[in-house]
Image (cartoon, rainbow, N blue to C red):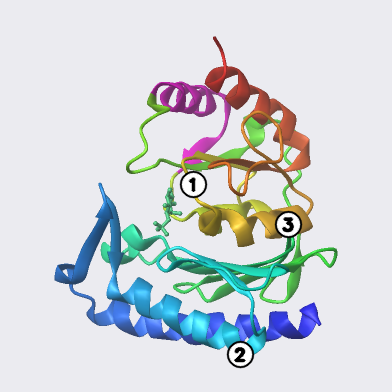
């Protein structure tokens, strides 16, 4: 059942991606709205989300939703879609062609399917629990970096939650000093997908929402990566902090973040 649902979800992402691509060509910065401090949204995010929900309703009737723009729709207790219709909205608005659609399916409390579609590069990452992760239908795996010194690390910074500014800056300094470098490319779902296919060796971020990470997290897990919150527990979906890394560097990486964020 999940395999056939996945094929339909991939097609939905590609179709809505086509809409976003067309809008990108003519998008006017005057169409921006602010959801909160520095937190931007446009009619493109909202229309994309409506189209995704309308299509998913036909794929799995009666499922619940946790959506970035539309909030929560409670229906089935068993199945919940978690959707970010345009992850990387700020990139989109500033005409940086690095944004994606992220769609995950949760069955009871478990993520069972994830699709991340990079609209600009036409790369589609996908996973079903227990069946591995794929990039454009080819299997992918996390990197084999031997240590942090060999690692390229991704992160992001919340634009309006500054509660952890001090440890965020301290961790950043440590990571800059101890790795091949840091990238902040502006979409959590693609950061995670890049960890899954070994382009990044590790990723961490504070202040995220479930829709930013749900699909990408399953894609990392199914590609052999390790996921946790900053303290090493599994509350990364709703706990607003996430670490994702290749198994070979996870411990070293997590211990830097944990000791910096939770040192007293
Ligand atoms: C944002 C992106 C960004 C991350 C932010 C998210 P949005 O999502 O994933 O990389 O740093 O915290 O809010 O708002 O573009 O869907």
The span from disc 1 to disc 3 (Cα, nearest Å) is 19 Å
Tell me, yes or no, whether the two marked residues, 3 and 2, touch with CB atoms within 8 Å: no
The span from disc 3 to disc 2 (Cα, nearest Å) is 22 Å
Quadrant in which residue 129 is drawn: bottom right
The span from disc 1 to disc 2 (Cα, nearest Å) is 29 Å
Q: Position of residue 126 (x, y in %)?
A: 68, 70
What residue does disc 3 label? 109
Quadrant in which residue 75 is drawn: bottom right
Q: Disc 1 or 2, which lies upstream in sequence?
A: 2
Q: Disc 1 or 3, which lies upstream in sequence?
A: 3
Residue 23's place in the image compared with 207, above or below, is: below
Residue bounds of the magenta highlight: 166-183
- Would you say the magenta stretch is mainly helix, strand or loop? helix
Magenta highlight on residue 203: no
Label placed on residue 58: 2
Q: Is 20 positioned to the left or the right of 241 in the image?
A: left
């Amino acid at each position: 059942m999940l395999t056939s649902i996945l094929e339909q979800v991939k097609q939905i992402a590609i179709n809505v991606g086509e809409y976003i691509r067309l809008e990108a060509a003519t998008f006017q910065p005057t169409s921006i709205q602010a959801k909160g401090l520095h937190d931007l949204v446009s009619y493109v995010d909202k229309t994309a989300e409506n189209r995704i929900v309308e299509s998913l309703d036909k794929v799995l009737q009666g499922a619940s939703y946790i959506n970035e723009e539309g909030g929560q729709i409670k229906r089935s207790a068993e199945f919940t879609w978690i959707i970010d219709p345009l992850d990387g909205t700020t990139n989109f608005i500033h005409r940086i062609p690095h944004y994606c659609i992220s769609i995950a399916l949760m069955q009871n409390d478990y993520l069972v399917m994830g699709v991340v579609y990079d609209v600009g590069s036409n790369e589609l990452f996908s996973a079903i629990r227990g069946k591995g992760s794929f990039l454009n239908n080819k299997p992918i795996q996390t990197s084999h970096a031997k240590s942090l010194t060999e690692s390229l690390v991704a992160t992001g910074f919340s634009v309006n939650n500054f509660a952890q500014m001090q440890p965020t800056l301290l961790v950043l300094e440590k990571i800059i000093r101890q790795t091949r470098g840091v990238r902040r490319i502006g979409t959590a779902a693609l950061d995670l997908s890049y960890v899954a296919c070994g382009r990044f060796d590790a990723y961490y971020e504070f202040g995220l929402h479930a829709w930013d990470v749900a699909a990408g997290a399953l894609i990392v897990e199914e590609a052999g990566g390790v996921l946790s919150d900053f303290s090493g527990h599994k509350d990364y979906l709703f706990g607003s902090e996430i670490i994702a890394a290749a198994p070979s560097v996870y411990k070293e990486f997590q211990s830097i973040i944990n000791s910096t964020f939770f040192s007293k």
